[in-house]
Image (spheres, rainbow, N blue to C red):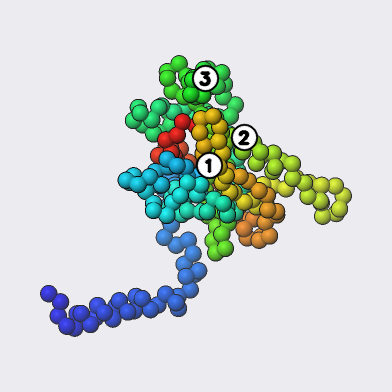
Amino acid sequence: MIVKDEQQSQVAVKKEAGAVTNNVDIESFADAGFDNVDSKSLALPFLKVLGQLSPQVTQGDSQFNPQAKPGMIYNTVTDELYNGAEGMKVIPCFYKLEYIEWRDRDKGSVAPVNVYSADSDIMSKTTRDEKGKDRLENGNYIEETASHYVTIVEPEKSSTAMITMKSTQRKKSKKWNSMMMSLRQKKKDGKGFFRPAPFTQMYTLKTVLEKNNLGSWYGWEIEHIGTVESEDTIKGAYDFYESCKKGSVRVNHGKEEQQVEKSPF
């Protein structure tokens, strides 16, 4: 039982706790409290294009979100949704091509069996089946997976994420890489041109409806905006690039696999 004086004291504490935030210099506490947080303690979000069968748009699924619609872009960590037609702004910071070995989903596990580097000869050991999957002798299949590590740019904040492009979206990845490789800007002295680093350039990612003889789905559409204007934003993107290059950014492809729609293409 709480007596009156104790109740008044508790009310005073609550008022005090709710009143101080406007007067505290939060910036002075920057980075405090993250002492033991390293790359093993973080989950890099994936940006996924939602389809007709994605868990987020399927009523009754544990991941169902009433605001989610096919064609939206979904952040797997924050659960944020972006309008696919309007798009979102990102800065490409790092790129990696890998060959990922998977078991069929009906086998129970959603974790990759193995991840092979871009210079692996694993694809030469596969055979294409009737559904277009590249199968190994053990029955598992290999997906050629292009990973784009990006900085998400929003009016009041920026964050990092990864986009994987495979199957029908591999050509989008190749197109994006070609766009970045072909960019040229004039040198300061006016004598010739140079190719700008990807993390200095901003792009809009949108989604579009695509189809083939197997059906229809939403895929990526990429547009170049121009050079990033904010020096701080470029520095942040460069720091992310350095972390990716050093291998200190951890990726859980199994977590991504749990978020994708069960689609035949």
Q: Nearer the viewer, residue 95 or 211?
A: 211
Classed neighbour count for the residue bearing mark 1: other residues with Cα under 10 Å, few (<14), some (14–19), many (≥20): many
Q: Residue at x 64, y 55 (%)?
A: 234
**Residue 82 percent across, percent down from the top left:** 51, 54
Q: Nearer the viewer, residue 82 or 183?
A: 82
Where is mark 3, residue-wise?
128
Relative to 213, 174 lies left or right = right
Q: Secondary structure at mark 3?
A: strand
Relative to 141, 174 lies left or right = right
Q: Secondary structure at mark 2?
A: helix
Q: Residue at x 57, y 24 (%)?
A: 120
Q: If you read the primary sequence from the N terminus, does the residue marked by circle 1 or circle 3 appear first?
A: 3
Q: If you read the primary sequence from the N terminus, does the residue marked by circle 2 or circle 3 appear first?
A: 3
Relative to 201, 11 lies left or right = left
Q: Nearer the viewer, residue 62 or 35?
A: 62
Q: Which mark is residue 218?
A: 1
Q: Secondary structure at mark 1?
A: strand
Q: Quadrant of residue 113?
A: top left
Q: Quadrant of residue 89?
A: bottom right
Q: Which mark is residue 171?
A: 2
